[in-house]
Image: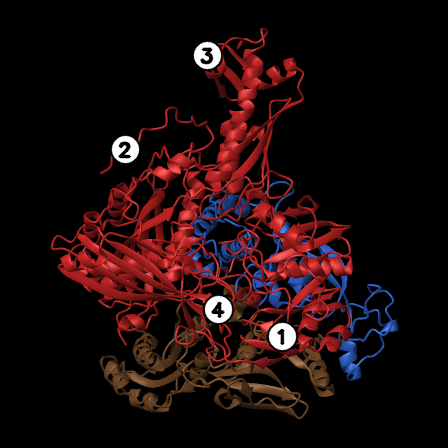
Chain colours: A blue, B red, C brown
């Protein structure tokens, strides 16, 4: 794996052993405000390259920034929603290397080198993905706030092959809460999309 | 039965749009992630705010480590009662419409756990969050008064939103004296939290004395006026956008302290500020469904007819404001009884003030009433459906007025038939499924008022024959953007694809509030009327123009259809809207409309949506694990504008009923007064696998009195009836009558 | 906050040695916790250490790498001995959690309601640790010492779990919760049964979770079940001494209910582990 080369020249306060330093990210305390937002002097910043929807994004963030907040607040990919920030609702579900995860439980720094797919990455130009279309046709949402997460979860659910029956879909789609309770329609949408995708 | 009132002379014709099961017009935006909710807004120079909230329920904040918070890199400002700038309106006053006393750092008092006690503003969300934590508040705590055992009882002269706390008809004691059987029972319902998937969020920006706000909002124009009052600026200086709400359920109809504080921070710092509540912070300042303790007495005669019905509710409210869950009023309008008494008391506790939450009063009250009816049927040895039919109200029991329309009997019949109710054994614990699980069937009646508020709308017919329609409505998931556009298109006599619909901001005429299941009727009525106003003006132009094929047809002599005016006396003579405008040399033609109830009808009629819900549950005989396996609801709610969306609303309501019956409960630590499960892990709502096979039947109902369009609402009725149906099914499966919600799995073992 | 992302175990141990640092694997327990308290001075992300993830055959048994996820368990081609662990893996939060959460994270977090622990106890799992003083290995029962307490020493990390072979053994697991998924358990029971030639129980291993500070094996019941015929299970379970369990009353369930429920589930799980339909 390629380790991002930190801008260490001005961030030299490395801690730990030589081995640790070599293997770690830029765990450096920023001592001058240069190259950071002008009014701030943060403790430590790291430079990341995240691959989201096939595109490389370079960003400089604090290590405590989650993938969810990096997507929403730094990359303006706001289709992914924050419902609880604790992994309890699934609204922030994205695919990481093809598997669904709660992006609120992944640090942006841990996502480096992984392939991230968000709701914005599904459509083919102006043509929605069949799963997106199935959700719209089945009225598988009301307020729409959990919908991105539901659809990303549905993508994985179909890929995993867990669509053999409505019961199986309900079970494997149970990591995504929908307070509007569009569950019957979500189940129908996943079934319809799975059939279309063969 | 009273003499029916005459029908309105000329029922309004519907166009070809309403009644169609169209998919959501905003569906594509929602499935692609392109729908922008408030927290998705990133204006230039944005700062992030984080709230610090109280961890005690009563006392005062004695210390906040402001220095530590300010020292954290990235923190820009810390706002506490010490430095909070003055507001032009007292947050403890109640003079604004539909307002509750709020906590906006007016002093150091703490009156509930989760109350905002400081705001930290920073360059990043992470810095603001850490800054808020670094405040490490200290308190002078006083003993929390939480729970019915520790609260402060008080009479409740008013309940809900301005309803009297006591209502009665007939001679109650005479009714009980005449009864051959009296069932006396009681039910408890817990505090519940709206928990819309979208936490409350606001982005505020000032430009001089003009304020721009992005926030999810169920009452746009009312909020605009309230914010103007708080900040001492003219109403027109407040621009509020709420294009998408990630769920509301009542909690986004009422302003709360955090929103005012965010706007204040933006003004203090001269930069836009975003504040998003954490999930835990949703359990404090933004309302909840107050807990209730209800007692009911039902007297019946030898034939099973109610002789007296008494319903008393004690409803939790806060120590500093009133929202008394009007639970007992659920008994006023559903079952015929010569004597009815509904009365309420309040129990003040150190919690945030409750507020309206999906079917406020109706949900909790229906839960108790429908279970009590089941108990009375059981005592009388009658099938629960038969018992309800015996007590079918032909006129509104409390007022004696005729109903505007009531197809409840059809709901009972169609629902029972679809469910397969016939042959249900009377006694409990008689049915098992193939896996040996105890199986039970229960039912409940559903009822919800059909209110209307006030709304205005504007329609502009454009030179090309298409139209723009506007009203500041709110789509929190009910499908307003679609249903309202359908009604607007009908008013205009246009296909919906010819109609551009704008809504969700203060740029539009006042669309009223999205609440009380009255939004479609009210805002839709305004839009339809605006469209008809345009058509009337267009008709005037055409029929007065000798060049028009419609010349001389007179106003009542044409029909608007598919973008043309057509002569009623000769359908071959018609003219396209665009041509009429062109000849008149008009670029556009504007009309306006209002939505409101006809006062005469409102006075003369009782107006409700009705329904019947049937549920099947399976219970593990040894473990008590409960699974709702089937639900069938049949609902009569006037004219259905969009059956696809209405069905989704009804499903959602029925699952809320399931959630009420089996899952939802905020549990308070009696010592600290904190909600112990202030998250989505401990506060259970159903997951997909908890939902049963479902059916929602829409029963035709032609209501000529409720409004010109015959529209009621479907947003809240689904929860009523459903709670009781499930609880009654659990009794039928197990023989155990659980009188406290939510029903826990161990409860049904009778431990 | 410092953030380390080593790719080798040696580097990881070097970092751990250099100063206080919180190990991070799947993050599904750590991140929610972070939001309730001060951030750690330093985090070390172990997820990139290649040798730490995956299930492999080793002499006399199986090695489950520390950062093996619950989904890895669900998808692995493992014998029936692991049926209980596989079922438990499906109960850890949601699929999203199972895709991130790791086996070692579950045991290090040491929650009384940790979904993976009862099944691992019945697999006689041992824990390998590596630290500045070298490596050591101890039984899982000795590793978890209390509520959120483990035997991890300064600078030590878990590198793997080891499950010995048990030919013919079959596992089973049941979690009782108030909601179908995303639920903190009311009670959990896991069992491994190794049948004797004659169809009776040769060896039974039973563990109960969420009913005591630490999930517990029930040696008394295990002994009583040895040699028991399928028809006799109910009687043995009914007579079992469950006094080792000390469930609490909370919003999820009363202590009395938990004990009753455990006894009921015990019967079902043991029958299932014997390969019979409950």
Q: Give residue A23's quadrant in the image.
A: bottom right
Report whether mark 2 lies on the same chain as mark 1.
no
Q: x, y percentage for residue B561?
A: 49, 21
Q: Secondary structure at mark 3?
A: loop
Seen in the picture, residue B261 relative to B138 is either above or below; the reply is above
Which chain hosts label 4? C
Q: x, y percentage for residue A137?
A: 49, 42
> Seen from this angle, which residue lies furthest bottom?
C133
Question: What numbered label is drawn on residue C34?
Answer: 1
First along the sequence among labels 1 and 4: 1
Which numbered mark, 1 or 3, is in the foreground of this view?
A: 3
Disc 3 to disc 4, how far (Cα)? 69 Å
In this rendered view, identify the residue nearer to me: B25 or B629. B25
Residue B150 appears in view? yes
Seen in the picture, residue B24 relative to B628 is either above or below; the reply is above
Check disc 4: other Cα within 10 Å, few if <14, some if 14-19, many if 20+: some
The residue that disc 4 covers is C74
The residue that disc 3 covers is B571
First along the sequence among labels 3 and 2: 2
Q: Give residue B261's quadrant in the image.
A: bottom right
Report whether mark 3 lies on the same chain as mark 2.
yes
Which chain hosts label 3? B
């Amino acid at each position: 794996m390629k380790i991002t080369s930190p801008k260490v020249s001005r961030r030299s306060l490395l801690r730990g052993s030589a081995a640790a330093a070599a293997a770690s990210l830029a765990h450096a305390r920023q001592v001058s405000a240069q190259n950071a937002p002008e009014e701030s002097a943060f403790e430590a910043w790291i430079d990341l390259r995240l691959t989201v929807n096939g595109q490389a994004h370079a960003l400089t963030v604090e290590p405590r920034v989650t993938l969810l907040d990096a997507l929403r607040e730094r990359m303006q990919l706001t289709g992914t929603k924050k419902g609880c920030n604790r992994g309890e609702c699934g609204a922030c579900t994205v695919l990481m290397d093809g598997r669904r995860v709660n992006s609120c439980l992944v640090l942006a720094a841990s996502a480096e080198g992984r392939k991230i797919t968000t709701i914005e990455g599904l459509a083919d130009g102006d043509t929605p993905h069949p799963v997106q279309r199935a959700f719209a046709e089945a009225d598988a949402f009301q307020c729409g706030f959990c919908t991105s997460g539901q659809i990303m979860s549905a993508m994985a659910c179909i890929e995993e092959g867990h669509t053999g029956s409505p019961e199986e879909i309900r079970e494997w789609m149970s990591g995504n809460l929908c307070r509007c309770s569009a569950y019957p329609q979500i189940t129908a949408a996943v079934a319809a999309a799975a059939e279309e995708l063969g | 039965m009273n003499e029916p009132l005459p029908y309105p002379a000329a029922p309004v014709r519907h166009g070809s749009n309403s009644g169609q099961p169209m998919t959501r017009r905003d569906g594509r935006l929602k499935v692609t992630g392109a729908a922008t909710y408030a927290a998705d807004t990133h204006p230039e120079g944005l700062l992030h705010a984080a709230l610090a909230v109280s961890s005690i329920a009563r006392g005062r904040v004695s210390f906040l480590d402001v220095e530590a918070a300010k020292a954290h890199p990235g923190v820009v400002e810390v706002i506490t009662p010490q430095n909070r700038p003055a507001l032009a309106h007292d947050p403890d006053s109640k003079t604004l419409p539909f307002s509750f006393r709020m906590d906006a750092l007016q002093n150091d008092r703490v009156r509930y756990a989760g109350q905002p006690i400081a705001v930290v503003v920073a360059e990043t969300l992470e810095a603001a969050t850490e800054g808020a934590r670094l405040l490490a508040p200290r308190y002078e705590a006083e003993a929390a008064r939480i729970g019915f055992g520790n609260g402060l009882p008080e009479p409740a002269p008013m309940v809900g939103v301005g309803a009297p706390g006591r209502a009665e008809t007939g001679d109650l004691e005479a009714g009980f004296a005449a009864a051959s059987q009296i069932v006396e029972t009681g039910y408890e319902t817990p505090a519940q939290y709206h928990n819309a998937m979208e936490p409350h969020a606001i982005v505020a920006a000032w430009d001089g004395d003009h304020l721009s706000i992005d926030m999810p909002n169920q009452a746009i124009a009312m909020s605009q006026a309230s914010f103007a009052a708080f900040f001492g600026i003219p109403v027109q200086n407040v621009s509020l956008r709420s294009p998408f709400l990630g769920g509301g359920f009542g909690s986004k109809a009422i302003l709360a302290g955090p929103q005012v504080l965010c706007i204040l921070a933006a003004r203090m710092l001269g930069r836009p500020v975003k504040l998003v509540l954490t999930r835990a912070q949703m359990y404090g300042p933004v309302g909840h469904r107050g807990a209730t303790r209800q007692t009911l007495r039902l007297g019946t005669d030898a034939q099973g007819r109610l002789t007296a019905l008494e319903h008393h509710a004690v409803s939790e409210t806060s120590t500093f404001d009133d929202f008394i869950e009007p639970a007992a009023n659920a008994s006023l309008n559903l079952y015929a009884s010569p004597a009815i008494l509904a009365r309420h008391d309040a129990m003040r506790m150190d919690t945030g003030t409750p507020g309206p939450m999906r079917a406020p009063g109706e949900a909790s009250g229906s839960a108790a009433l429908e279970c009590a009816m089941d108990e009375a049927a059981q005592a009388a040895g009658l099938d629960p459906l038969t018992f309800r039919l015996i007590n079918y109200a032909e006129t509104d029991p409390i007022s004696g007025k005729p109903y505007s329309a009531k197809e409840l009997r059809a709901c009972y019949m169609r629902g029972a038939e679809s469910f397969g109710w016939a042959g249900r054994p009377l006694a409990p614990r008689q049915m098992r499924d193939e896996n040996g699980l105890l199986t039970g069937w229960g039912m409940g009646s559903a009822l919800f008022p059909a209110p209307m508020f006030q709304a205005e709308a504007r329609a502009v017919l454009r030179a090309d024959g298409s139209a723009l329609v506007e009203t500041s409505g709110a789509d929190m998931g009910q499908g307003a953007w679609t249903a309202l556009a359908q009604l607007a298109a009908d008013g205009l006599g246009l296909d919906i694809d010819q109609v551009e619909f704008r809504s969700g901001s203060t740029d539009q005429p006042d669309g009223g509030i999205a609440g009380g299941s009255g939004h479609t009727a009210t805002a839709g009525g305004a839009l339809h009327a605006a469209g008809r106003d345009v058509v009337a003006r267009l008709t005037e132009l055409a029929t007065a123009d000798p060049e028009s094929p419609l010349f001389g047809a007179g106003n009542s002599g044409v029909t608007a259809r598919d973008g043309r005016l057509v002569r009623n006396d000769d359908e071959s003579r018609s003219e396209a809207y665009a041509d009429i405008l062109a000849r008149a040399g008009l670029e556009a033609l504007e009309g306006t409309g209002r939505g409101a109830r006809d006062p005469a009808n409102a006075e003369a009629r009782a107006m409700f949506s009705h329904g019947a819900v049937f549920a099947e549950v399976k219970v593990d005989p040894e473990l008590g694990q409960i699974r709702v396996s089937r639900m069938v609801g049949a609902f009569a709610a006037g004219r259905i504008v969009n059956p696809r969306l209405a069905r989704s609303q009804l499903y959602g309501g029925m699952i809320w009923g399931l959630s009420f019956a089996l899952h939802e409960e905020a549990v308070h630590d009696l010592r600290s007064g904190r909600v112990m499960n202030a998250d989505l892990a401990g506060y259970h709502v159903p997951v997909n696998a908890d939902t049963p096979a479902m059916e929602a039947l829409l029963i035709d109902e032609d209501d000529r009195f409720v409004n010109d369009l015959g529209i009621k609402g479907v947003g809240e009725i689904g929860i009523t009836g459903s709670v009781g149906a499930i609880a009654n099914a659990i009794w039928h499966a197990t023989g155990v009558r659980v009188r406290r919600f939510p029903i826990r799995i161990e409860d049904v073992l009778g431990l | 906050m410092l953030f380390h992302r080593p790719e080798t175990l040696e580097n990881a141990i070097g970092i751990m040695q250099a100063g206080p640092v919180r190990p991070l694997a799947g993050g599904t327990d750590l991140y929610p916790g972070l939001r309730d308290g001060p951030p750690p001075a330093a985090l070390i992300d172990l997820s990139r250490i290649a040798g730490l993830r995956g299930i492999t055959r080793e002499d006399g048994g199986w090695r489950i790498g520390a950062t093996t996820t619950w989904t890895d368990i669900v998808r692995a081609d493992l014998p029936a001995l692991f049926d209980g662990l596989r079922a438990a893996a499906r109960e850890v939060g949601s699929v999203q959690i199972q895709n991130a959460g790791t086996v070692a994270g579950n045991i290090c977090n040491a929650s009384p309601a940790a979904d993976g622990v009862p099944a691992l106890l019945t697999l006689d799992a041992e824990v390998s640790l590596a630290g500045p003083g070298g490596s050591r290995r101890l039984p899982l029962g000795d590793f978890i010492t209390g509520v959120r307490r483990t035997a991890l020493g300064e600078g030590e990390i878990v590198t793997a779990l080891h499950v010995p072979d048990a030919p013919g053994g079959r596992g089973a697991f049941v979690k009782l919760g108030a909601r179908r998924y995303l639920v903190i358990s009311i009670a959990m029971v896991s069992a491994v049964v190794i049948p004797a030639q004659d169809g009776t129980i040769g060896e039974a291993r039973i563990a109960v979770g969420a009913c005591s500070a630490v999930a517990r094996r029930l040696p008394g019941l295990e002994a009583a079940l040895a040699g028991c015929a399928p028809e006799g299970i109910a009687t043995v379970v009914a007579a079992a001494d469950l006094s080792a369990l000390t469930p609490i009353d909370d919003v999820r369930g009363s202590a009395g209910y938990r004990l009753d429920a455990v006894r009921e589930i015990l019967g079902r799980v043991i029958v299932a582990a014997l390969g019979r339909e409950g």
